[in-house]
């Protein structure tokens, strides 16, 4: 059956492999699909992850790295459940995650291991029949009251291939289980006739064997039958499996609630479709060539999804167009076809349903007919004709009218259509049962329409409005809202439905009764999308005409908020009307600043007239207008006027300010000052000052500058403010500014204040005190006799400036008593230092004696007080030494400096007391007091002072050194002073002077002669400065540090002196080191060692000998020293010198002292080097710490194999022993050792050695132990092959196949070897071990070796069907096999290979090409195949194929077949092809066959022309071949009157009277009666035309009767409508009389347009305002019949 005509259509939705899903994950245990929304895949390779595929966007899978045993998606939402076994236990852990929120929702630990996907609530225990079963499905019914668990187990012993199915059915309410045999099951809901509650059904399919017989059944059973209600009768049906599917079994079952179908899907891809209600078989087909393991319901479309092992996600759906014809036609099950059509609302059963309805109706089974009509598919019976039928049935008394039965049935089934709703409502309204209508509307049982609303309006306006709204009868809805005065709802509704009512008329109507409501309505109109439908100005005029100023203002203020330029006129208008009527409102509007596009000059004039001077100023733009208005300061708020000045330019503002000052200076000064303060930056401070100065208004200047002063740094402004304040008598302000300001010109201000002679001198004091004019101040106050202010200034203002005051008073020759009194009045607050300085400059220091003594008596410790007092004592020579030595408070530097010119010795006393080093050095140098200087320097012990004194830059350094050496140090008894002096000499790098100093101290029997440090220092200094004296000092001195001095001597290269020192102090090791390292005399060292006979000395000598390469002597010395510490160096040196006999002696000595692995290891090596193998055997048997492994490796590397063999055998290192034996060519022993080592590396070494030695038997023994390791196999193979040992290698590999640990690599490598060296064995090997081969590797080798048959087989096994097909075609002599190629061809992925295969078969196997194309029919492009065959000239060859695929209606196929039929003159098949398949070049075919010699062919041409609408050509061909019936039928179908009449004329011309009569009836609708009668009369054929004439008269008589009846009804309706229009017209005239004359006329009824589309009442047909209706087109009304 063609796929297009099948009742179930299949399509591939998705291929999982295209999403990167691994093939091994496409199994039941890895993949789940619980609904048609998600597929969940659990991957284990290349890493553990879970892939979630959303079927709405399958190409965007979500992959998460998750490890789990099971993964399941929620059927409805993005929630993932995971189950994993806890490590180390048998318990399962269940976790639930919300993928969208990326959060864990729940977690549960199972008490025992669970199988399958389960909720974390235990529902029931598994029954015994499910033990050891693999659970494959778990289902529950929608109410979750019934559960079913399904498992499978191995089949019975007589037929194990047939899997056994077991089912456990569990009732939640009864808590009981029932065990059944079934492979698949599902629940369904079904509504049984007579039971309003749906029944729960379970459907299950089973396949079992009993006594060798296979039984396959489908069962449908009701669960939980309802008491007292009709139940579902149990059904069962057979499942018919084809013979080839004997071991196939059901794996899944899905039920389509939409269509009432059961889908049973088997493992091998069979689909069984059964009807749910009757269990009747509907369809069976194989939907997948690969095994199906999972299905899921596609509930929305009534189908299911299936997934097979190839990863194809298949979707099965009901073919709505064909299933009903299929059931009624091929199955001949009319009842099932009708039920399917009704159940699924499917096409195809129309004729059956109509026929059944007529039968029921004729049998007066009205109830059954009503039910059939209500359930008719696609509503084919729910028509006015059906209603009319029921209406026409006479009502029997005491019985329900059939019409009501019909409507009742419809109401119970669902919703009525528009016509049914209208007819039922008419019945209800006539019976005044309005409540029924309300209930039906609430239940949405009626389809609303405008006619229904008109009907209901007669009884209920509210209900009618609801109906109008649902029916979208917009004019009626608007009219209803208008009647209810709900005008706001009109706008909302109109916007929702896109309707435009007559807004102007509505606004006028509202305005009469509710002005505020009119405002709201107008605002709502203004906010409509697309703009206000009525002009704002028109709306405003409506309000103004009724003097509704406030309402008009409110409307305009709201709509003008956007402040658009195009609204300028309206802005002016709203301001005008309010300035004239309500100025305060206009003022508020202007204050808000919401308008900016109105006529400003006009508004300015109105504001001035209304007394709104501020607003007038804001709107005037000319200076004269502003000056005229601004002088009205009495009526302008000052603050507003000040703000207005801010809007003017600088020049205009100053002009206005001048005018205000000229008009009234006193009254307007405050405003001007405030303005200047506010806008000083804009106007300029200078201009403002100049303005005040121009009017000599110091008061204004004072107030203006007072506000600006704090922010200004201009000295001139600060000065002018001080000046203005002084002139206005603001002395306190002058005092404050002079005290606080930092910006005025101090000199200028001082001079001004002195000239002003203010009675209060505080401002002047502030200026002079702050800016250093104290002498000027003092002079001014003294000369002005303001002594009180002098005393006040010194005592209270700034006592710190008293010295300046005193100095100026002294300069002004003020009496000393006043000055002394002034000083004493300040006392301790007076700064002494500047006071002393001022008096000292004027040589009046004695004036302060009383003051200073008074301070001292008060306990003052001020250094300046004591300095001044000391100066007075020094000048008076009143025992100054006593003061200098006893007074602790004076400054030594100050007083010493004062004494330098008077008495230098006093200066030294002062400096010594204060440790003033620099000053003392300078004064002693200057006055040649070097002895005092030397004593001071020695006593100070200060390094920095010594550095300065002994500096080369000091020209008096020699005199100082002489005094230090001769006087200062000999006098000193302090070691610290001596040490500091010595250190200073050393630091100054004066070695000779230091030696001189030390010899005097150390060698001349001073107190420091035996000083240890000084002796060390003397010798060390001599080593550095005078080496010739060193040996003498060594011999004369005994108390020095010998080791340290000796080391210094060595460093100074005084080796003999160093040797003498070490020898003097018995430091023999250091002494011999000097001989060895410095003097470098081994002979003297050996002599010295024999003399002292110390082990340490011999050790040093041995080391030196070792360094010099005297290895034997060094070994002898080490033995004498009994020193084993240097054994590493000795071993190295002995090995380098090859003196192993001496080394053995040394190592034997060393072993007695230490147990070192190195020593024992080297001893074994030395034995090996001198070939003492017996000693080695004895040594290893003795206790030792030798590292035998390292020694053995070393011996092996140096080819000492016999010794290495002893060592490796002793330590059981079989791997190394095997290698050693290989070197010794002892192969059997090497194999034995390798067997003990059991190491891959060892086996390889021995194996390769045996191969090289051609010991292949031993090599094979080794090789079998190597090739079981995958990583080493290739290396062994390459080694054999590189040496040409192919047969031996193949023998090795063949032996390896039987190994217990044989792996894929061995099988693959043997296959590679067969391919290269034994091709005759290759195919057998591949077929035997195809599952254990690395196929890709073997594919490459077969390709290289050109084994095409084997290569094809490998490609097929590896599922690389594209490459397999290519190989077969490219190498067909060897690789081609027809059956194999067909199997491969259907599985290739590259579409081009299909066509390449067609070419291949065409060239090499044309006899089998149809067989191939039939297999590829569903995959190839038929057009391309036909093109290929046409180009090759072999279309006839593929005729069977084209016939098979013609059902696809492909143009190329149709044309090719039609051409073949023409060539074969098979007109029957040609006509059949044309009728069933219309996709071809019809005109081309017609032209091709219209001249064919066969009549039937030419008839087909006419038929084609007729189908193509080329009526004339078709008729011409038919007439030509005398096919008059065809010509008449063609003419009738054309609908062309001219053709029909031409055909009549033709028949008359041909004297075909019978044809003339027949044509009249066939073309009855096209032929005009007058033409027919005329032709018949003229050609004497009236008799033949008379039947036509009778029919025509009868038909037209009936039409006239119908017209008369319709006209009478139309006249009645017209009269009723005219009466209604007159009433409406009267109402409109009433509104028109109320409208003002200034308003525009209302729209003419019947006119369209935006904003004028009609009001809420239908307009009269053509009438105007107050005029009666005019007849249409000026014609009088037509009369009645």
Image (cartoon, rainbow, N blue to C red):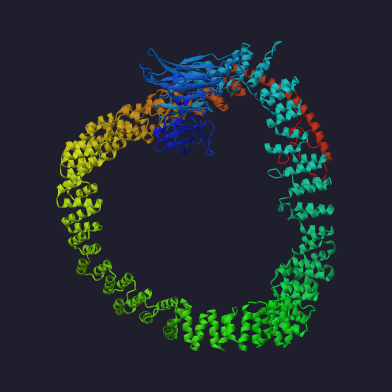
Residue 399 screen position, x and y as percent: 69, 11
In terms of image quadrants, where is residue 240? top left
Question: Who's the residue at 77% across and 84% down the image?
Answer: 784
Residue 446 screen position, x and y as percent: 67, 25
Dividing the image into 4 quarters, which one contains the C terminus? top right
Residue 533 screen position, x and y as percent: 72, 43
**Above or below, 408 relative to 1161:** above
**Above or below, 677 relative to 224:** below
Q: Is residue 1326 left or right of residue 140?
A: left
The answer, for residue 147, to whether it is visible in the render is yes
The front one of 1652 and 29 is 29
The front one of 581 and 1143 is 1143
The front one of 1301 and 338 is 1301
Q: Count the marks: how many? A: 0
Dividing the image into 4 quarters, which one contains the N terminus? top left
Question: Who's the residue at 47% across and 77% down the image?
Answer: 941
């Amino acid at each position: 059956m063609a796929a297009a005509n099948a009742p179930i259509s299949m399509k591939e939705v998705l291929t999982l492999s295209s999403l990167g899903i691994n093939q091994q994950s496409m199994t039941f245990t890895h993949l789940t699909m619980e609904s048609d929304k998600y597929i969940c895949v659990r991957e284990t390779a290349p890493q553990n992850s879970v892939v979630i595929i959303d079927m709405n966007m399958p190409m965007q899978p979500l992959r998460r790295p998750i490890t789990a045993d099971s993964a399941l998606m929620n059927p409805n939402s993005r929630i993932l459940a995971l189950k994993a076994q806890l490590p180390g236990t048998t318990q399962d852990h269940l976790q639930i995650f919300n993928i969208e929120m990326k959060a864990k929702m729940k977690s549960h630990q199972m008490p025992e291991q669970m199988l399958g996907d389960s909720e974390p609530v235990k529902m029931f225990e598994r029954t015994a029949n499910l033990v050891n079963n693999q659970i494959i499905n778990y289902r529950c019914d929608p109410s979750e009251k019934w559960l079913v668990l399904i498992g499978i187990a191995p089949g019975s012993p007589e037929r194990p291939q047939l899997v056994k199915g077991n089912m456990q059915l569990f009732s939640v309410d009864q808590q009981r289980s029932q065990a059944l045999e079934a492979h698949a099951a599902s629940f369904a809901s079904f509504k049984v006739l007579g039971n309003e509650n749906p029944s729960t059904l379970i459907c299950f399919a089973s396949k079992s064997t009993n006594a060798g017989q296979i039984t396959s059944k489908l069962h449908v059973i009701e669960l939980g039958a309802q008491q007292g209600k009709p139940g579902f009768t149990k059904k069962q049906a057979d499942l018919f499996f084809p013979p080839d599917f004997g071991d196939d079994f059901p794996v899944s079952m899905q039920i389509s609630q939409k269509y009432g179908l059961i889908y049973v899907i088997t493992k091998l891809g069979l689909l069984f479709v059964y009807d749910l209600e009757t269990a009747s078989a509907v369809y069976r087909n194989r939907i997948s060539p690969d095994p199906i393991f999972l299905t899921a319901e596609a509930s929305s479309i009534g189908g299911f999804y299936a997934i097979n092992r190839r990863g194809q996600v298949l979707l099965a759906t009901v073919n709505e167009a064909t299933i009903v014809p299929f059931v009624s036609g091929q199955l001949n099950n009319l009842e099932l076809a009708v039920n399917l059509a009704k159940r699924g609302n499917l096409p195809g059963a129309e004729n059956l349903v109509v026929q059944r309805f007529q039968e029921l109706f004729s049998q007066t089974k009205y109830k059954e007919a009503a039910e059939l009509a209500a359930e008719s598919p696609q509503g084919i019976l729910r028509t006015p004709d059906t209603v009319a039928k029921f209406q026409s049935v006479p009502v029997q008394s005491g019985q329900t009218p059939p019409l009501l039965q019909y409507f009742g049935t419809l109401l119970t089934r669902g919703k009525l259509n528009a016509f049914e709703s209208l007819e039922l409502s008419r019945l209800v309204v006539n019976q005044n049962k309005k409540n029924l209508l309300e209930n039906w509307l609430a239940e949405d049982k009626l389809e609303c329409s405008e006619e229904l609303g008109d009907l209901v309006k007669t009884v209920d306006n509210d209900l009618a409005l609801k109906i109008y709204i649902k029916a979208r009868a917009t004019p009626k809805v608007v009219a209803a809202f208008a009647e209810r005065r709900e005008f706001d709802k009109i706008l909302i509704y109109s916007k929702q439905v896109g309707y435009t009512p007559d807004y102007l008329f509505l606004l006028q109507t509202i305005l009469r009764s509710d002005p505020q409501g009119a405002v709201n309505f107008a605002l709502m109109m203004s906010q409509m999308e697309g703009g206000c439908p009525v002009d704002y100005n028109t709306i405003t005029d409506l309000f103004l005409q009724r003097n509704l100023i406030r309402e008009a203002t409110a409307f305009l203020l709201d709509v003008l908020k956007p402040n658009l330029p195009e609204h300028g006129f309206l802005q002016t208008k709203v301001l005008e009307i309010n300035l004239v009527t309500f100025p305060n409102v206009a003022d508020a509007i202007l204050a808000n600043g919401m308008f900016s596009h109105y006529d400003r000059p006009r508004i300015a004039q109105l504001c001035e007239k209304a007394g709104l001077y501020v607003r007038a100023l804001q709107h005037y733009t000319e200076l004269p207008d502003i000056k005229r208005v601004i002088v009205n300061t009495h009526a302008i708020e000052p603050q507003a006027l000040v703000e207005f000045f801010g809007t003017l330019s600088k020049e205009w503002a100053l002009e206005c300010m001048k005018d205000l000052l000229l008009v009234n200076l006193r009254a307007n000064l405050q405003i001007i000052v405030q303005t200047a303060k506010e806008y000083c930056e804009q106007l300029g401070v200078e201009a403002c000052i100049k303005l005040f100065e121009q009017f000599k208004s110091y008061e204004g200047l004072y107030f203006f500058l007072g506000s600006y002063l704090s922010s200004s740094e201009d000295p001139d402004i600060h000065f002018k403010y001080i000046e203005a304040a002084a002139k206005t008598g603001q002395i306190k302000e002058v005092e404050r500014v002079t005290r606080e300001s930092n910006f005025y010109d101090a000199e200028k201000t001082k001079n001004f204040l002195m000239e002003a002679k203010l009675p209060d001198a505080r401002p002047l004091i502030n200026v002079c005190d702050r800016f250093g004019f104290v002498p000027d101040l003092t002079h001014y106050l003294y000369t002005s006799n303001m002594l009180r202010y002098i005393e006040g200034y010194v005592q209270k203002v700034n006592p710190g400036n008293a010295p300046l005051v005193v100095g100026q008073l002294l300069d002004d020759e003020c009496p000393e008593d006043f000055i002394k009194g002034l000083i004493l009045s300040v006392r301790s607050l007076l700064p002494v230092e500047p006071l002393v300085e001022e008096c000292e400059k004027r040589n009046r220091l004695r004036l302060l004696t009383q003051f200073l003594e008074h301070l001292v008596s008060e306990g003052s410790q001020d250094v300046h007080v004591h300095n001044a007092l000391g100066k007075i004592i020094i000048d008076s020579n009143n025992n100054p030494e006593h003061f200098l030595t006893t007074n602790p408070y004076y400054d030594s530097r100050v007083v010493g400096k004062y004494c330098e010119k008077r008495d230098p010795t006093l200066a030294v006393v002062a400096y010594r007391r204060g440790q003033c080093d620099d000053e003392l050095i300078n004064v002693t140098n200057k006055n040649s007091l070097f002895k005092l200087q030397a004593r001071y320097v020695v006593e100070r012990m200060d390094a920095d002072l010594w550095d300065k004194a002994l500096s080369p830059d000091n020209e008096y350094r020699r005199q100082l050194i002489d005094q230090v050496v001769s006087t200062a140090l000999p006098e000193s008894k302090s070691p610290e002073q001596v040490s500091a002096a010595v250190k200073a000499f050393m630091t100054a790098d004066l070695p000779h002077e230091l030696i001189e100093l030390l010899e005097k101290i150390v060698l001349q029997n001073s107190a420091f002669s035996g000083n240890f440090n000084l002796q060390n220092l003397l010798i060390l200094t001599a080593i550095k400065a005078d080496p010739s004296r060193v040996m003498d000092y060594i011999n004369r001195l005994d108390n020095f540090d010998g080791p340290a001095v000796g080391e210094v001597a060595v460093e100074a290269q005084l080796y003999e002196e160093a040797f003498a020192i070490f020898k003097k102090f018995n430091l023999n090791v250091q002494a011999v080191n000097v001989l060895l390292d410095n003097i470098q005399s081994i002979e003297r060292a050996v002599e010295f060692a024999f003399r002292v006979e110390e082990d340490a000395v011999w050790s040093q000598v041995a080391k030196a000998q070792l360094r010099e390469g005297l290895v034997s002597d060094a070994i002898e010395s080490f033995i004498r020293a009994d020193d084993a510490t240097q054994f590493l160096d000795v071993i190295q040196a002995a090995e380098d010198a090859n003196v192993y006999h001496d080394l053995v002696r040394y190592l034997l000595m060393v072993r007695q002292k230490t147990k070192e692995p190195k020593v024992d290891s080297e001893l074994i090596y030395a034995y090996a080097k001198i070939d003492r193998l017996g000693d080695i055997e004895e040594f290893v048997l003795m206790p030792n710490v030798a590292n035998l492994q390292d020694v053995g490796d070393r011996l092996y590397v140096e080819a000492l194999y016999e010794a290495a063999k002893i060592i490796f055998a002793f330590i059981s290192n079989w791997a190394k022993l095997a290698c050693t034996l290989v070197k010794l060519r002892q192969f059997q022993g090497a194999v034995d050792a390798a067997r003990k080592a059991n190491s891959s590396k060892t086996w390889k070494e021995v194996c390769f050695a045996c191969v090289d030695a051609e010991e292949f038997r031993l090599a094979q023994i080794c090789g079998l132990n190597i090739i079981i390791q995958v990583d080493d196999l290739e290396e062994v193979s390459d080694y054999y092959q590189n040496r040409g040992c192919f047969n031996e290698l193949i023998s090795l590999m063949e032996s390896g196949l039987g190994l217990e640990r044989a792996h894929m690599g061995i099988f693959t490598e043997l296959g590679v070897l067969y391919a290269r060296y034994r091709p005759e064995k290759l195919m057998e090997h591949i077929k035997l071990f195809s599952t254990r081969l690395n196929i890709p590797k073997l594919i490459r080798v077969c390709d290289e070796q050109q084994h095409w048959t084997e290569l094809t087989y490998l490609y097929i096994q590896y599922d690389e069907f594209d490459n397999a097909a290519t190989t077969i075609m490219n190498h067909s002599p060897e690789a081609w096999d027809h059956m194999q190629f067909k199997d491969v061809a259907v599985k290739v992925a590259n579409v081009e290979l299909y066509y390449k295969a067609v070419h291949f078969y065409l060239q090499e196997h044309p006899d089998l090409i149809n067989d191939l194309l039939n297999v590829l029919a569903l995959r190839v492009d038929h057009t391309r195949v036909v093109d290929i065959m046409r180009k090759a000239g072999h279309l006839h060859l593929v005729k069977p194929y084209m016939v098979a695929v013609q059902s696809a209606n492909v143009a190329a196929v149709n044309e090719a077949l039609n051409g073949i039929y023409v060539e074969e003159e098979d007109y029957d098949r040609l006509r059949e092809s044309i009728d069933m398949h219309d996709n071809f070049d019809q005109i081309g075919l017609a032209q091709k066959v219209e001249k064919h010699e066969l009549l039937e062919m030419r008839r087909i041409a006419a038929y084609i022309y007729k189908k193509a609408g080329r009526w004339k050509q078709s008729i011409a061909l038919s007439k030509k071949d005398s096919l008059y019936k065809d010509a008449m039928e063609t003419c009738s179908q054309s609908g062309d009157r001219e053709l029909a009449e031409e055909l009549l004329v033709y028949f008359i011309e041909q004297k075909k009277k019978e044809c003339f009569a027949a044509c009249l009836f066939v073309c009855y609708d096209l032929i005009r009666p007058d033409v027919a009668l005329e032709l018949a009369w003229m050609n004497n054929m009236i008799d033949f035309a008379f039947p036509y004439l009778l029919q025509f008269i009868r038909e037209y008589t009936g039409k006239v009767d119908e017209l008369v009846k319709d006209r009478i009804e139309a006249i009645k309706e017209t009269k009723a409508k005219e009466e209604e229009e007159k009433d409406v017209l009267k109402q409109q005239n009433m509104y028109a009389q109320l409208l003002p004359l200034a308003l525009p006329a209302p729209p003419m009824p019947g006119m369209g347009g935006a904003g004028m589309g009609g009001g809420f009442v239908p307009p009269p047909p053509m009438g105007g305002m107050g005029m009666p209706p005019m007849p249409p087109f000026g014609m009088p009304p037509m009369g009645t019949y």
